[in-house]
Image (cartoon, rainbow, N blue to C red):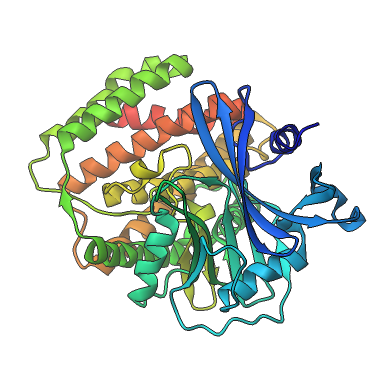
Amino acid sequence: MTPEEQLASYLSGARWFGGKSRPFEVAGMTVIELAPGVSTNLVTVSSGDSEDVYQVPLSSYDEPQERLAHARVGAWDDRHHYDAVHDRDAMHVWLRAFAGEAVADARVSFRRTDDHALDTSTHSTLYSGEQSNSSLAFGEDSLLKIFRRLTPGLNPDIEIHEALTRAGNPHIAALHGYAAITTAAGDELQLAMLQQFLRTASDGWELALASARNLFTQADLHAETVHVEEAGGDFAAEAHRLGATLAEVHGVLAEAFGTSPLDLGEVARTMGRRFHEAVEIVPELAGLKDGLLAEFAALAGVTDPESAQRVHGDLHLGQTLRTSVGWKLVDFEGEPVKDLAERRLPDSPWRDVAGMIRSFDYAAATVARDLGSTSDEAAQVSYRSGEWTAHNTQAFLSGYAEQRQRPISAAEQVLLAAYVADKAVYEATYEARNRPGWLAIPLTALTALGQARP
């Protein structure tokens, strides 16, 4: 097999490769040597009329490496090549480069954005859960994220982290630096980012699941007088802090990047178009058409001026970490399915707020799926699920409003309702395509939203 064929074979099985659903071929590879036997490679993937560039760091050896057999990419030019993120020796080259050590290819630069003294005595540990990129921890000192699909221009994850780091905002993992290369065409490709390792972090999604699970198992499901705040599953204090965290981050982003007028008429039209496209994929949405389209159309009637700004863009509980010093927001890349230029566009901060509200509903519904063997029990679990979601949503919104020092206005309530509905429409499309068994979660929410509007 040619090197291109071996690379294509490896890509087809890689979790982070987004081109599995259609025929493709490797059209070329640019090798960027960092040190002897360590390189990062820009692999051009051709599929029909489109081309994408993926980053494949490689470690290369004269002899096969049994310890890296699971990460074998192939053999060519009399050497054996492995995906370097699995190779601690190779990844130590990246860490030393961020610490100031020169690399072989002058086209790539490792830029520091703070003065944190990196601990180069540590070794890397690869995270197994990430899908679109590859992340590694260097001991408990720093975290390296290697971007897999590359697009010319500023990566919003780096751009926003750098702005928040320079502002001294405590609600993100501080950015230590990033790696970039200038192509022959003069474009900059940002390859990776190095940031603070959050030692005491707990995943926000898992904390919410534990909260809902505690409520459902500890509270008397059949007792209407048991309130969520009285049971072991209360999450409201954390939801309140999370709302305040998001409001503070939004304020810093507005100051750092500025704001612009939000065209609510265009927003309404875009949401309407997305709904009609979703009906083609999820026919069950057709029966909700009148209520949901009215929700979107109501945006055009809002006369209060609204602003667009840089936002997270894909916020949910899985993008949050609870540390000993408060909540942290992570992964500011935006929705992975969108082009990079679109992910950098200003948007309404209510998109982030809506994403978190929908995530509360998903957390409760995820736990509820596993409970309730009889119809009566299922009804009670559904009741408790709705109670948990509503209680924590209200706490989250209260925290958001208190931090920005003004209540949520009637006009903003209209915006929020539309963005929540739009997010649920997106979820319905996603679930229909990827997890049909989960489709009931967004459909149930959309049914309630459609019925709520007179």
Residue 83 visible here: yes
From this view, report whether residue 120 is shown above or below residue 454. below
> Percent x, y for residue 454?
23, 27
Quadrant housing residue 277? top left
Specify whether 316 is left or right of 124.
left
From this view, report whether residue 277 is shown above or below residue 76. above
Q: How many numbered tags mark residues here?
A: 0
> Percent x, y for residue 352?
36, 50
Residue 232 visible here: no
Residue placed most toward the observer, 167 or 451: 167
Residue at left offset 50%, top offset 41%: 383
> Percent x, y for residue 259?
18, 56
Residue at left offset 68%, top offset 39%: 370
| Name of the residue lying farthest toward the left | 303
> Percent x, y for residue 56?
65, 48
Specify whether 382 is left or right of 63.
left
From this view, report whether residue 26 is shown above or below residue 342. above
Specify whether 212 is left or right of 127.
left
Specify whether 1 is left or right of 201.
right
From this view, report whether residue 221 is shown above or below residue 161. above
